[in-house]
Amino acid sequence: MESPTILELIWSARWPILYGLGTTVLISALAIAGGTVIGVGLGLVLAYGNLAWRFAGRLYTDFVRGTPVFVLVLASYYILTTIGLDLSPFQAGVLALTVFCSSHVGEITRGALQTIPRGQTEAAKAIGLGFGQTFRYVLAPQALRLGLPAWINTAAEMVKASTLLSVIGVAELLLRTQEVISRAFHSLEFYLLAGALYFAINYAIERFGSYVERRVATD
Amino acid sequence: MSAPLLEIRDLHKSFGSVEVLKGVDCTVQAGEVISIIGSSGSGKTTMLRCVNMLEDFEGGSIRIDGEEIGYLTDGGRRRRKPEREIARQRALTGMAFQQFNLFPHMTALENVMLGLTLVKKMPADAARATAEGWLDRVGLLNRKDHRPSKLSGGQLQRVAIARAIAMSPRLMLFDEVTSALDPELVAEVLQVITDLARDGMTMLIVTHEMRFAFDVSNRVIFMNQGRIGEEGDPKTMFANPSTERLAEFLKNSRFS
Ligand SMILES: Nc1ncnc2c1ncn2[C@@H]1O[C@H](COP(=O)(O)OP(=O)(O)OP(=O)(O)O)[C@@H](O)[C@H]1O
Ligand SMILES: [Mg+2]
């Protein structure tokens, strides 16, 4: 009997790989979306909060950013259980990545807001805009443009970090790939395939980023 | 007699422990054009910024059409007015800055329209018409769809002036609006201000352009170390300064 070609091998493993891919995309999307929402709020606190709020925000941001993602993943799976919060591996993993993402987006948002010259706020005030209007129409669009490249980086990092969830048993792309390899061998080919798929996801993020960047360009 | 358009009484302002305005009094009637001159650090910018509440101040009062700006006193306690109220009062004055401060993500037209739609609550059509009218007045209607990055310094400042004036403020404040410009672009901006003066706009103009101050203003205020050192009509003041300080200052100023 002839041994199957690599394409036949991949074809026979298509379902686990696709499920893995779907899970990876879902985890990343949830973490990026949640992390961005929380992170923008965090950035606002860091940029405009009063002393107490800023201090709390700073503590959270620096603590999370100073901790390896891997540790965050393990902590949210193993430690939260000890305080009675029983999360599934998927939930714990998404939580850890969301927290991680929020700290980065928080810092990006703060940096972007503080890079905008003070004259912008003053000009907005001078024509009678309130703080909310100033933020929405003057500061946010400029912060978006300034923070976008770093945000894309962070989003891509989140996709890569999602591989760490394989350790707590989340059946994302890497874990599925490893399972396939354990049955069908050909580890080189399957790892290459997984690599190509991760690349494709991040390429899509990058394209999306450039698209938004073009939309908000100022010249 | 009706209240003066602007009335500043005993204005005091400190940055930390440094007192920058040490009791400024100034009354401006509607239609007056007043130039504020004085050496660097004398408090000219700070005074304008207080009028527009871009700076808080600790002592004295500022009134526009009799209405107290920024603070209210009840039961002997002086309190800052709510932010909403201050935003409304800021719209009573228009301000043009040395650095233009146009919004870089908006076209010239959008820059001028923003306050009209958000603050004046004009419908988009009316706001557009008003904004185009003012851009036309400053000679930039054909540039209305350009972003700031595509405009020269002089054009930027003219758009910025249109943006402020379109809000129909009671009073215009100009803070060294030509200082950041290349010399060949200064004239076009001064021309716009001169036209507005001719139309009867009330203005406070901080400037280092002595010739312009001389030509455009009814009155000149010379700021000296946080106080008004001398004021009067430009002809008398420039010809016969009554203080040593002003004489010294004029001697060191360019008069082209
Ligand atoms: N935000 C600030 N914090 C601390 N000190 C300030 C601040 N703004 C201004 N000052 C100080 O207040 C004084 C008056 O400044 P101001 O800008 O009003 O002077 P000016 O007359 O406009 O000078 P110039 O002609 O250089 O523009 C200066 O000594 C300046 O250093
Ligand atoms: Mg100044």
Image: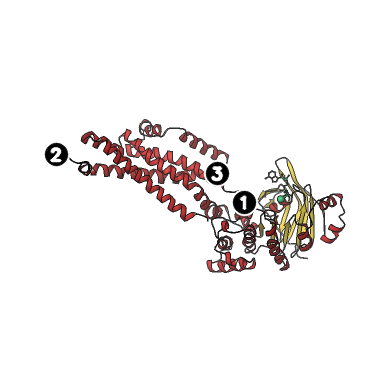
The reply to the same-chain question for discs 3 and 2 is: yes
Q: Which residue is mark 3?
A: A47
Residue designated by label 1: A119
Q: Which residue is mark 2?
A: A2
Measured from the top left, where is residue B141 in percent x and y?
Answer: 59, 67
Query: Which is nearer the N-term, disc 2 or disc 1?
Result: 2
Task: Check disc 3 and report its element: helix, strand or loop.
Answer: helix
Residue B233 visible (yes or no):
no
Q: Quadrant of the N terminus of chain A?
A: top left
**Depth check, front residue: A127 or B5:** A127
**Mark 1: amino acid:** Gly
Q: Position of residue B29 (x, y in %)?
A: 76, 63
Closer to the camera: disc 1 or disc 3?
1
- Residue B196, percent from left and from top: 70, 66
- Chain to which the residue tagged by mark 2 belongs: A
Query: In whole angstroms, how far apart are the C-alphas of marks 2 and 1?
Result: 74 Å
- The amino acid type, in three-letter code, at marker 3 is Ala
Q: Residue at x 44, y 53 (%)?
A: A212
- Cβ of disc 2 within 8 Å of ligand 1? no
Task: Tell us which disc is closer to us: 2 or 1.
Answer: 2
**Colouring method of the image:** secondary structure
CB at mark 1 closer than 8 A to ligand 1? no
